[in-house]
Image (cartoon, rainbow, N blue to C red):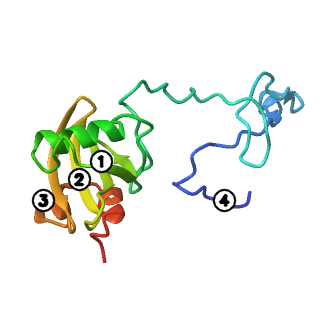
Amino acid sequence: MGAVPQRSRHSTAATLTPVAVLTMGAACGGPPQVAPAPTGPLLPSPQTSGPSTSPPPPTLGPGSFTPPAGRAVSCGGEPSAEEILDLLREEGLLTGDTEATVAEGPLCEQDWQYTVIEVPDRDPLQVVTSGDPGDLTLVTAGTDVCTVDVRVRAPDGIRVAASCVG
């Protein structure tokens, strides 16, 4: 019998093919017998379509969005742009009457956020925060947020969004 091809250890699904099984009837004095091919649902091969047997992805509630690793994406309103502005006011970086708008973000990865704030007649203010919506902590804010803390602790997607890589 020929060699059996090896499957990649990175394969995420095994391909099952219905096969007939030869029994050893001849060794017991009778002719070889063919067992019927298995019936019932099988896992589809990657090249075919069919019903999936893997469980559906979990449904995530507000504040539990997890973007792909290494990529910061829109936070979907959790936290909101207003929540970031409120945090900056609480920290004394913006006054109550400062006209400020969110130009980019908040972008999220894990429990970190990156936001760019525009204030008239000033350079854009980059803001890095961490924590859950409603309980944010200001990590840093300024025209260059690539502090040691951000470079060491922030997820890749936040560092990329803040231009702290390269």
Residue ID for mark 4 = 5
Residue at x 27%, y 68% (from the top left corner): 123
Q: Amino acid at mark 3?
A: Asp
Q: Amino acid at mark 2?
A: Val
Which labelled disc corresponds to residue 128?
2
- Alpha carbon of mark 4 to alpha carbon of mark 3: how far? 49 Å
> Mark 4 or mark 3: which is in front?
3
Circle nearer the N terminus (4, 3): 4
Residue at x 28%, y 32% (from the top left corner): 133
Residue ID for mark 1 = 113
Residue ID for mark 3 = 149
> Mark 2 or mark 4: which is in front?
2
Question: Is 58 situated above or below 100?
Answer: above
User: How packed is label 2: few (under 14 Cα within 10 Å), some, or many (20 or more)?
Assistant: many
- Residues marked 2 and 4 touching at CB (< 8 Å): no
Quick one: 103 or 46, which is closer to the camera?
Answer: 103
- x and y, in percent, of residue 23 in the image: 78, 31
> Mark 1 or mark 4: which is in front?
1
Circle nearer the N terminus (1, 3): 1
Left or right of 34, for residue 57 = left
Question: Is 11 situated above or below 20?
Answer: below
User: How packed is label 4: few (under 14 Cα within 10 Å), some, or many (20 or more)?
Assistant: few
Left or right of 131, for residue 113 = right
- Alpha carbon of mark 1 to alpha carbon of mark 2: how far? 6 Å
- Residues marked 1 and 3 touching at CB (< 8 Å): no
Q: Residue furthest front?
A: 97
Q: Residue furthest top?
A: 40
- Residues marked 1 and 2 touching at CB (< 8 Å): yes
Quadrant location of residue 62?
A: top left
- x and y, in percent, of residue 58 in the image: 48, 26
